[in-house]
């Protein structure tokens, strides 16, 4: 019943014969398509002439084996042709255009999608690997057959991995466990996932696999008798109820046993459900009849029943799972499914090709795969680079799922630990970007609430709302993380451009000029020299601190213009800077490109100086801050600024309040601060000598005058003996 490839058609050294492949293809493809596949084999054999694998065999045996695996999955002839040619673009001199001219554009696109990026120089192996995988995954979004070819390619490579070095074996096995086995699982192709996991397990942790294998062998004698007993009991029960069905007992694969031991921190002897049984019947309602039957036969284990028929997994998998206490008190697992469910469970998205003329067996996993591929496209658009994209994909490939409902009854599956924000992004990116609150089971709840199985979640949005950077601390799904980061990057870029324009105009004002009056030819020449696309990119570079506005201004002004050296504010002493006529005014609303140093926490009214920080913009310090150090060594990074006449918002600052060591002192001091209209962000208490206590408050104030009001009020508190403003080194 399972569509696993048979190895009966392999010759003694493990290689497939082209005659066997063609004979197999004649069983489901018309003769002209079989002839096209044979022509592709000849084309590939000629292209790979003289090339050998690490094992020493001719290279063509590898694509032939890949094609055979896909043939067993009953893939169409174009997919098989692409499998036979999947390495010609990467490993031979044949270009994509020649493949397209000979076998068509569809085949060429499939071959190109599987090929690695070999023409680009990357900084590291990790970056090259990430870029190649990103290319493959994006090609998969255009045609799912790309990943099916790649999975078959990886499966044959894993079967023949012994020819590689020990280091290569470990690296390839780790990549298989991290990327390819989870992709096979995500697409529902169970038999490929299981074989990839066991092969990778054997090469990555050979000793651990041997230990588990020996443990299984030691218990096999007694367990085999138990399996036979349970199978007989199940078959007899089905016969008594006149139910037509197949019963199959099996041992779980070694990596599955190891993963359960690792995840549950249990030894092998503590795993009771190493053996599982599958009952396959004809109809869905019969599944539930069989469930009642087996629960009457053996006692069910509380909390171990899962209905994946009513609520399928994200990859389309459907079955009833139940755990029972079997003979001799041994716990067993039983899976109940229909024949169509079994096909989807083993073949997943491939069932769309294998059984597409026999009903709708493949439509559900195909639709679910399409949703996942759409999410991949969104992640790619928002990710900063290929390495970041790959990390998000890895997160997305390991869902331990929870099932949730929208108010209209739509079911969404999310990674376990998902929050209301993850749910919002799962509905749509725009919903996530504008969410402000959530109702969980009709009750208001924070957006950070972790969701549980079966809850109904309603997301409340507001126009103008935008993602909060703090969400990154609790979201768990890749889609939410990518969208939040992408949105914040766009906000930062917009703020950097606006701020960079202000910085540049402040410097150009020294020449009685501004950016709108700068000579267009000189500006274009500078942009070309700096390799910037347009003036917005220049503003962003300045706003992010990657270029100094003063130096850019000098380059943009005619060299014959008066050089205002000593007037630009760069490198002036603290005494001279008061003569500067064009200081930049800070309002406090510049966003992420202007930050306020935590060491001295400047507030409006303080004398301030700024330092350029590449990638961050400018960091504002109080002018007397000790962390500014020797200003002479930082002339190229200094920027003399001032507060706007009308600063906006509230600014954090720290004060230390020394009080007598009395009960209730903290409450009295906090109450006095609150009276003056200040919020307390944080407070720390430290006893000094048994008689006095230091209370350090992080408070929000509007200005230096507001802080003075707070300090005056605190001095009237009898317990307070001393108040100082905190500056940290």
Image (spheres, grey):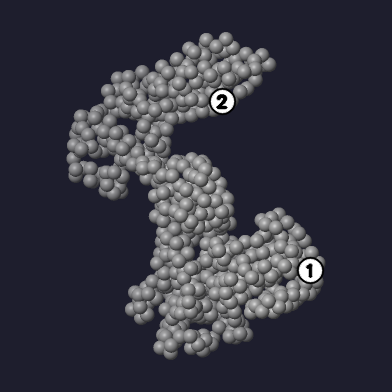
Rendered location of residue 671, percent (x, y): 53, 19
Q: Label 1, secondary structure: give it.
A: helix
Q: Label 2, secondary structure: give it.
A: strand
The CA span between labels 2 and 1 is: 62 Å
Foreground: 174 or 567? 174
The residue that label 1 is drawn on is: 327
The residue that label 2 is drawn on is: 683
Foreground: 324 or 294? 294
Vertical side of 648 occupied by 42: above or below: below
At horizontal 64% and vertical 70% (from top left) the residue drawn is 289
Q: Is residue 283 visible?
A: yes
At horizontal 65% and vertical 61% (from top left) the residue drawn is 305
* Mark 2 or mark 1: whose residue is earlier in sequence: 1
Residue 237 placement, left or right of 387: right
Residue 625 placement, left or right of 236: left
Foreground: 331 or 687? 331
From the image, which quarter does the N terminus lie in?
bottom right
């Amino acid at each position: 019943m399972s569509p696993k490839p048979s190895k009966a058609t392999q010759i003694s050294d493990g290689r497939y014969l082209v005659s066997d492949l063609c004979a197999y293809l004649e069983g489901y493809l018309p003769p002209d398509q079989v002839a096209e596949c044979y022509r592709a084999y000849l084309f590939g054999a000629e292209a790979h002439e003289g090339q050998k694998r690490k094992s020493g065999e001719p290279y063509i045996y590898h694509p032939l084996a890949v094609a055979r695996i896909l043939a067993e999955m009953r893939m169409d002839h174009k997919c098989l042709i692409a499998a036979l040619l999947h390495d010609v673009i990467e490993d031979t001199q044949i270009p994509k255009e020649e493949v397209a001219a000979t076998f068509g554009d569809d085949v060429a696109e499939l071959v190109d999608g599987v090929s690695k990026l070999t023409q680009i120089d990357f900084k590291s192996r990790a970056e090259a690997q990430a870029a190649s995988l990103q290319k493959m995954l994006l090609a998969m979004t255009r045609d799912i057959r790309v990943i099916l070819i790649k999975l078959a390619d990886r499966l044959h490579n894993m079967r023949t991995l012994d020819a590689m070095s020990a280091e290569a074996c470990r690296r390839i096995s780790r990549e298989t466990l991290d990327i390819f086995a989870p992709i096979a699982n995500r697409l529902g192709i169970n038999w490929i996932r299981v074989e990839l996991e066991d092969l990778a397990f054997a090469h990555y942790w050979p000793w651990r696999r041997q230990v588990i294998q020996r443990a299984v062998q030691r218990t096999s004698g007694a367990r085999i008798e138990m399996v036979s007993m349970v199978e007989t009991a199940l078959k007899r029960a089905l016969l008594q109820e006149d139910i037509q069905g197949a019963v199959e007992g099996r041992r779980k694969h070694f990596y599955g046993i190891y993963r359960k031991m690792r995840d549950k921190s249990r030894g092998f002897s503590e795993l009771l459900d190493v053996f599982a049984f599958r009952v396959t019947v004809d109809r869905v309602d019969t599944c539930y009849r069989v469930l009642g039957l087996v629960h009457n036969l053996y006692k069910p284990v509380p909390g171990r029943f899962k209905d994946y028929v009513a609520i399928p997994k994200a990859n389309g998998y459907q079955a009833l799972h139940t755990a029972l206490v079997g003979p001799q008190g041994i716990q067993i697992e039983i899976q109940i499914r229909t024949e169509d469910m079994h096909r989807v469970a083993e073949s997943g998205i491939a069932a769309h090709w294998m059984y597409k003329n026999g009903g709708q067996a493949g439509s559900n996993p195909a639709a679910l795969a399409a949703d996942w591929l759409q999410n991949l496209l969104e992640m790619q658009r928002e990710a900063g680079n290929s390495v970041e994209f790959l990390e998000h994909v890895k997160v997305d490939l390991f869902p331990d799922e929870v099932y949730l409902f929208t108010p209209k009854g739509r079911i969404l599956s999310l990674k376990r630990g998902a929050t209301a924000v993850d749910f919002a992004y799962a509905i749509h990116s725009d919903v996530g970007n504008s969410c402000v609150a959530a109702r969980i089971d009709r009750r208001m709840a924070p957006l950070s609430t972790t969701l549980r199985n079966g809850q109904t979640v309603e997301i409340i949005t507001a126009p103008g709302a935008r993602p909060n950077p703090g969400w990154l601390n609790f979201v768990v799904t890749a889609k939410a993380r990518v969208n939040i980061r992408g949105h914040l990057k766009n906000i930062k870029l917009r703020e950097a451009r606006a701020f960079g324009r202000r910085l540049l105009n402040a410097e150009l004002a020294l020449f009685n000029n501004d950016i709108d009056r700068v000579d267009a030819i000189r500006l274009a020449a500078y942009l070309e020299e700096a390799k910037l696309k347009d003036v917005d990119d220049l503003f962003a570079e300045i706003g992010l601190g990657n270029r100094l506005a003063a130096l850019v201004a000098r380059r943009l002004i005619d060299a014959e213009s008066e050089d205002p050296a000593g007037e630009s504010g760069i490198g002036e002493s603290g005494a001279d800077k008061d003569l500067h006529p064009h200081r930049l005014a800070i309002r406090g609303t510049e966003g992420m490109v202007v930050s306020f140093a935590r060491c001295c926490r400047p507030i409006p009214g303080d004398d301030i100086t700024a330092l350029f920080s590449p990638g961050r913009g400018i960091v504002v310090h109080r002018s007397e801050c000790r962390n500014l150090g020797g200003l002479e060594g930082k002339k190229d990074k200094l920027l003399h600024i001032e507060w706007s006449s009308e600063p906006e918002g509230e600014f954090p600052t720290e004060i230390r309040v020394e009080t007598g060591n009395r009960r209730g002192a903290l409450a009295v001091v906090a109450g006095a601060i609150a009276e003056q209209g200040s919020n307390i962000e944080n407070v720390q208490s430290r006893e000094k000598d048994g008689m006095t206590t230091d209370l350090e408050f992080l408070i929000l104030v509007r200005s230096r005058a507001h802080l003075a009001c707070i300090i005056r009020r605190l001095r009237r508190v009898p317990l307070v003996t001393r108040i100082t403003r905190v500056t940290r080194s």
